[in-house]
Image (tube, rainbow, N blue to C red):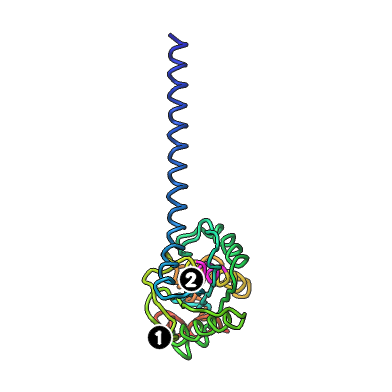
Amino acid sequence: MLERSLAADTRKGVRRALDAARRRVAADEAESARVQALYDFERSLAAERGASVVVGLDEVGRGPLAGPVAVGAVVLPPDAPPIAGLNDSKQVPAARRSQIADEVRAQALAWSVQMVDAADIDAAGMTTSLLMAFRRALAAVEAAGVAVDLVLLDGNPLRMDPREVSVVKGDGRCASIAAASIIAKVERDALMERLDSAYPAYGFASNKGYASASHIEAIRACGLSPVHRKTFCTAFAQDALF
C-alpha cells in the first residue's frame, strides 16, 4: 500500500514538473514571437516605403516635475538578430533595462540620447522642447554617417522631417522605437540618480522626478531646486530655496 502511494506521488510530481516545463516553453515561445513581431512590423513599414535604413525615436520624461526630457534615437542593422526582452521601456524591469540598453548600443549602427533641461522646458514649453530634442537626436545619428531613409516616431506626428512616420504605441510595436525608449530611459534615470546626490531632499533616485506624494511634500517643505520645472509645480511650490 505504501509503495503504491509513493509511486502515485512520484507520478504526480513528474506530471507537475512536465506541466511546468511545458508552460515555460510556451511562455518562452510567446515572448520570442512578441519580440520578432517588433522587427517584422518595422520591416514591413520600411518595405512599404522602399526604405532600407530606419531610425526609431522616442521620448522619456515628458511628465515629471523635475529633470530633463530625453529623446533616444536608434538605427538597428537591417539584418539584426532580435534583442531578447526588447519592449517599451515602461514594460521592462529596471534591472533588465540596463542590460538591454547595453545590447542596443553594441548592436546599433548609430544611436543618440538628447536631453532638454528643466530651465529650457520652462522657457520654451514642452512641445518646442520635444521638437528640439527630436531634431538633435536625428541630427546626431546622421552626423555619425548613417543615411536614414525612414524616421519612425512613437505617438503623434511632429512634422519635423519629410521621412517621418508616426506609429501609435510604436514603442511596443517597432524594434527601433522600443530600443530608443530604453536607451533614453536608462540615461535619464541615471542622471536623476546623480541629481539625487546633489538634491537629496526630493527622492530623485526613486521617483525620477515624477510627482510622487513624497516628492510633492518635499517641494512644499523645501521649495524648488534648480532642476525643477517651475511651470509644472505652480500648484504646490513655495519660492525656490536654491
Q: Position of residue 73 (x, y in %)?
A: 53, 75
Q: Quadrant of residue 236?
A: bottom left
On whether residue 181 falls in the magenta region, the answer is: yes
Q: Is residue 217 visible?
A: no
Q: Which residues are magenta?
A: 179-186
Q: Quadrant of residue 200?
A: bottom right
Nearer the observer, 150 or 224:
150
Question: Residue sitting at 45 percent across and 81 percent down?
Answer: 237
Q: Which amino acid, mark 1?
A: Arg
Q: Residues within 10 Å of mark 2 (few under 14, many from 20)?
A: many
User: Is label 1 or label 2 in front?
Assistant: 1
Q: Position of residue 61 (x, y in %)?
A: 48, 74
| Quarter of the C terminus within the rendering | bottom right
| Quarter of the N terminus within the rendering | top left
- Which residue bears the numbered disc 2? 215
Question: Residue sitting at 41 percent across and 70 percent down?
Answer: 45
Q: Position of residue 167 (x, y in %)?
A: 38, 72
Above-or-below relation of 173 to 233? above
Residue 26 is tagged as none
- Which residue bears the numbered disc 1? 159
Q: Position of residue 183 (x, y in %)?
A: 55, 69
Q: Residues within 10 Å of mark 1 (few under 14, many from 20)?
A: few
Report helix, strand or loop for mark 1.
loop
